[in-house]
Amino acid sequence: MNKEHSGSSEAEAPWSGRRGGRRRAGGPPPFGPEQERLIGAWFAGRIPEGWFESPASIEIDPDELQVVGTLAPPQLPEGASEEEVRVAEQARISGFREDSRGARMRIAEEAQPAFRRTVSWGAECGGSRVLFTTAGVPVMTRLRLADRRVLDTLIDAGVARSRSEALAWTVRLVAQHEADWIQELRDAMTSVEEVRARGPRGAGSD
């Protein structure tokens, strides 16, 4: 069975955290504005020309690189209905997914060991957006009785089938309703990283 992301390659890169040909053991992969720029530049150079209308959007966290590109809209007769447009967009995305599968797998195999993250893909076309593969990363947490009761209420109401599913649902709900605030937090953290990068280097650095 084909898999759209895999994780073994011998790619070498200055941003990979490798020393003497061996990957640095333990600890999270490098993360910050400079790392994001390097990753964006790598994908800009590695993604074949003609795939997307503009540079791909890359969402990054310590576990995953999610690469989403915008496809050219299909040409439809004037006056096409919304349903016809949606079907054409979905077909364009589906065709790209199948036609590019082999190349995307090769790119992922190069990027994953270098950036120490799983690579997932998606595409947008007009008003349609499809994520082909995403990494489901388990997150462990301890909850008090009141918090567990919230999750159990969601299960009893049929919103979720398990506590883990209920927790994921609440995270998505917060992201939906507090998107502006969360973006402000991200922007603030990015600014801190940029200021820190401009500061004096440690005594042991060259």
Image (tube, grey):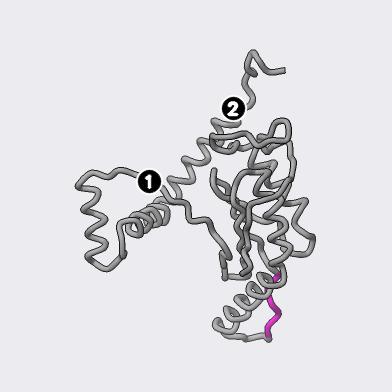
Residue 96, image quadrant? bottom right
Residue at (58% x, 26% y) in the render: 196
In this rendering, which labeled residue sits more in front, label 1 or label 2?
1
Between discs 1 and 2, the one toward the N terminus: 1
Residue at (59% x, 84% y) in the render: 84
Q: Residue 60 bears which disc, if any?
A: none
Find numbered disc 1 in the image and state the secondary structure of the residue it sits on: loop
**Extent of the magenta region:** 72-76
The quadrant of the rendering that contains the N terminus is: bottom right
Residue 185 appears left or right of 112: left
Residue 144 appears left or right of 92: left
Q: Assess whether residue 189 is covered by the magenta stretch.
A: no
Q: Main secondary structure of the magenta part?
A: loop
Residue 71, image quadrant? bottom right
Along the viewing direction, whichever of 14 and 76 lies nearer the viewer: 14
Instruction: Give the residue at mark 2.
Output: 195
For the residues labelled 1 and 2, the Cα–Cα distance comes to: 32 Å
Circle 2 residues within 10 Å: few <14, some 14–19, many ≥20: few
Q: Residue 140 bears which disc, if any?
A: 1
Going by the numbered disc 2, the residue's amino acid type is Val
Residue 74 position within the rendered picture, expressed as x and y whole percent measured from the top left:
69, 77
The quadrant of the rendering that contains the C terminus is: top right
Residue 74 appears left or right of 186: right
Residue 26 position within the rendered picture, expressed as x and y whole percent measured from the top left:
55, 35
Along the viewing direction, whichever of 174 and 80 lies nearer the viewer: 174
Residue at (57% x, 62% y) in the render: 133
Going by the numbered disc 1, the residue's amino acid type is Met
Circle 1 residues within 10 Å: few <14, some 14–19, many ≥20: few
- The correct choice, above or below, for 102 with respect to 79 in the image is above
